[in-house]
Amino acid sequence: MHPEPIIFLVSHPGQTSGSLEEILRQRYVEGYRIVVTFPDSDPLSDPLSILHQYREQSEQIALVIYEQRGESDEQGIAFLDDTKRLYPHSRRLLLTESPDPKAAVMAVNRTVIDYY
């Protein structure tokens, strides 16, 4: 029996991750494991390193969610681009507060992210 696939959330302090994590855990009580990482508050929780470890353990990642902080979407897009190489079949979601969606739309067009 294979373990349940993972929904992987990358968040930053001060964002809505607590409520998003709660919503995910309520909605996906069965069928998925929810993993949340806070790279700004814990330097040992580098999300890409964690995903590499999961890859070595043959874990399945169903969805990667990146909550973008600040005005630029480039950091989140670069991260999601890296995850595409590790997990090409996983869905990728960029959550952003940026009022200018140009970078996110370009990333969708490049198929780096599936949703924003």
Image (cartoon, rainbow, N blue to C red):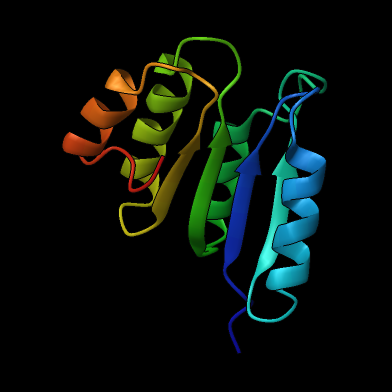
Taking depth in this image into account, of 99 and 88 the one nearest to the observer is 99
- Position of 3 with respect to 29 (left or right) is left
Residue 59, placed above or below residue 43 = below
The percent coordinates of residue 44 (x first, y second) are 76, 25
Which residue, as the protein is rendered here, is positioned at the far bottom?
Answer: 1
Q: Quadrant of the N terminus?
A: bottom right
Which residue is at a point 80% across and 56% down the rendered structure image?
A: 22
Work out which quarter of the rendered image holds the C terminus and state it. Answer: top left
Residue at x 33%, y 28% (from the top left corner)? 104
Q: Residue furthest front?
A: 99
Residue 113, placed above or below residue 81: below
In the drawing, does residue 113 fall left or right of residue 68?
left
Q: Position of residue 89 (x, y in %)?
A: 32, 59
Q: Quadrant of residue 2?
A: bottom right
Direction from residue 33 to residue 65 in the image, left or right: left
**Number of numbered discs on residues:** 0
Q: Is residue 29 left or right of residue 71?
A: right
Q: Tell me where residue 46 sits by quadrant.
A: top right
Relative image position of residue 7 (x, y in whole percent): 60, 58
- Compared with residue 51, is residue 105 higher up or lower down, i.e. above or below? above
- Residue 16 in sight: yes
Which residue does the image show at 80% across and 23% down from the upper left? 13
- Residue name at image x 17 percent, y 36 percent: 109
Image location (x, y in percent) of residue 58? 51, 63
Q: Is residue 91 above or below residue 85?
A: below
| Residue extending farthest left | 109
